[in-house]
Image (cartoon, rainbow, N blue to C red):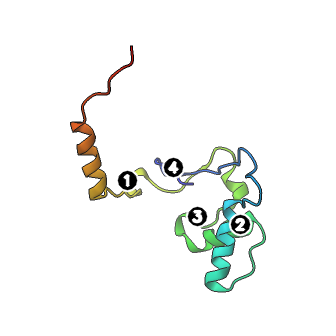
């Protein structure tokens, strides 16, 4: 994940998913395999290696180089602003007009 300050960070699983739930990297691997027919991804390291070959900001990095504190990969001014959908703006306006909620005594 690249945070809002442009720092690439590793996210660690907090708990094991229920039942047959797969890790995110396994879903990504299966999607890549379905789209490209590629079958060379066997671990999270393989997935990241392929990403680092395709994404200029990740070039030369590996999961071990990211470490526990992360790596700066872009300046904050390079980070795109989140899209503001028209519907989201309508919801915000509606929330502003909504009367305050009653408190239960």
Residue 1 appears in the rendering = yes
Label drawn at residue 46: none
Disc 3 to disc 4, C-alpha distance: 14 Å
Query: Mark 1 — residue?
Result: 77
Q: Quadrant of the N terminus?
A: bottom right
Front residue of this view, candidates 29 and 21: 21
Q: Of discs 1 and 2, which sits in the foreground?
A: 2
Query: Mark 4 — residue?
Result: 3
Q: In the structure shown, which secondary structural element does the residue marked by tag 3 occupy?
A: helix
Query: Which residue is the extreme one toward the front?
Result: 105
Q: Earlier in the sequence, mark 3 or mark 4?
A: 4
Q: Is residue 28 above or below residue 83?
A: below
- Residue 51's x, y, as percent? 61, 69
Query: Mark 3 — residue?
Result: 58
Disc 1 to disc 4, C-alpha distance: 13 Å
Q: Earlier in the sequence, mark 1 or mark 4?
A: 4
- Residue 38's x, y, as percent? 70, 83
């Amino acid at each position: 994940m690249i945070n809002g300050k442009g720092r690439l960070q590793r996210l660690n699983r907090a708990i094991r998913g229920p039942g047959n739930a797969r890790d995110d990297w396994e879903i990504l691997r299966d999607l890549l395999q379905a789209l490209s027919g590629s079958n060379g991804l066997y671990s999270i390291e393989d997935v990241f290696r392929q990403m680092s070959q395709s994404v200029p900001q990740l070039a030369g990095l590996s999961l071990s180089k990211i470490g526990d504190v992360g790596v700066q990969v872009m300046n904050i001014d390079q980070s795109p602003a989140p899209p503001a959908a028209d519907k989201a703006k309508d919801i915000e306006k509606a929330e502003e007009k909504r009367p305050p909620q009653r408190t239960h005594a």
